[in-house]
């Protein structure tokens, strides 16, 4: 939709107000579950094998720790700049969003809150999160809660079903999506730092991200 001026109108014609969406012949499917997308376009699955839940949790925490380092490097005076020119999202909102993804996941798996369309996009209150250190402290709380949830989870197969806006989904699927979602934004924050002439503190490596179904392009 970012590169298609008529993209929003096409979505609204289908009754859709959020992306990613795959549409064909007036029908659509949300793109959050790649297996659903594969079935929709007539493929026999994607061939992707998700990492085990324990590995996903480990990688997710590695990603969130990296983001803590990156947000501490962000100049406070530049937090209200756009992440990229053609999307109205500030660096401040993106920095909050990376950790909010984890908080939204925890609200779903612990409190039973439905994972709704804008669940991970709840913005910070006005007048808050005005420095990288504030983001890092928020991240510390999310990481601690995520680790506590995992340590106390009785059934670590993550086959439990969760209610989401794109249908009932296994916890394993939502966990994987949340992990790579945070990882994709971590990559974007590294790019922001590079644009500012700042070397990211402890880059995420190919090994750190291995096995996650990340988009090929940085801004997808």
Image (cartoon, rainbow, N blue to C red):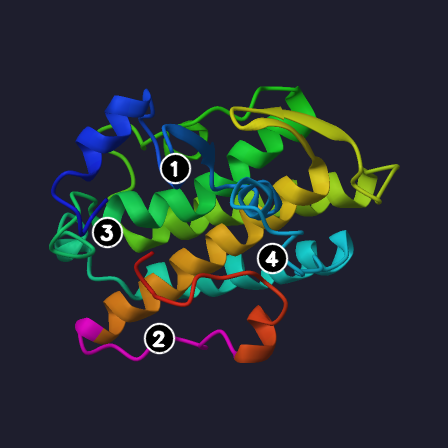
The mark nearer the N terminus, 1 or 4, is 1
Does 17 sit above or below residue 185? above
The mark nearer the N terminus, 3 or 4, is 4
Indicate yes or no whether the magenta region holds residue 73. Answer: no
The mark nearer the N terminus, 4 or 2, is 4
Does 194 sit above or below residue 149? below
3 and 4 marks in contact (CB < 8 Å): no
As drawn, is 71 to the left or to the right of 38?
Answer: left
Residue 97: x percent and y percent?
Answer: 38, 43
Residue depicted at x 65% and y 20%: 112
Query: Which residue is disc 4 drawn over?
Result: 61
Query: Which residue is disc 1 drawn over?
Result: 23
- Mark 2, Cα crowd under 10 Å, few <14 / some 14-19 / many 20+, is many
As drawn, is 212 to the left or to the right of 13?
Answer: right
| Cα gap from disc 3 to disc 2, whole angstroms | 15 Å
3 and 1 marks in contact (CB < 8 Å): no
Q: Is residue 77 visible?
A: yes
Find residue 91 and name its label: 3
Residue 138: x percent and y percent?
Answer: 45, 43
- State the extent of the magenta-drawn residues as a range: 195-205
User: Quadrant of the rendered structure where residue 107 is?
Assistant: top right
Query: Which residue is disc 2 drawn over?
Result: 200
The mark nearer the N terminus, 2 or 1, is 1
């Amino acid at each position: 939709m970012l590169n298609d001026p008529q993209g929003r109108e096409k979505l609204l014609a289908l009754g859709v107000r959020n992306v990613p969406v795959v549409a064909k012949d007036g029908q659509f499917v949300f793109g959050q579950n790649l297996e659903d997308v594969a079935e929709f376009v007539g493929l026999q699955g994607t061939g992707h094998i998700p990492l085990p839940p324990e590995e996903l949790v480990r990688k997710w925490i590695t990603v969130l720790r990296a983001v803590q380092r990156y947000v501490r490097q962000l100049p406070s005076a530049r937090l209200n700049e756009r992440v990229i020119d053609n999307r109205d999202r500030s660096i401040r909102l993106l920095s909050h969003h990376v950790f909010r993804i984890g908080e939204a996941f925890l609200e779903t798996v612990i409190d039973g809150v439905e994972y709704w369309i804008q669940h991970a996009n709840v913005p910070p209150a006005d007048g808050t999160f005005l420095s990288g250190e504030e983001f890092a402290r928020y991240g510390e709380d999310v990481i601690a809660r995520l680790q506590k949830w995992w340590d106390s989870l009785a059934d670590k197969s993550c086959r439990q079903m969760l209610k989401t806006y794109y249908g009932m989904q296994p916890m394993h699927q939502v966990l994987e999506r949340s992990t790579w979602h945070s990882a994709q934004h971590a990559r974007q924050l590294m790019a922001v730092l590079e644009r500012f002439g700042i070397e990211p503190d402890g880059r995420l490596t190919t090994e750190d991200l291995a096995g996650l179904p990340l988009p090929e392009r940085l801004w997808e």
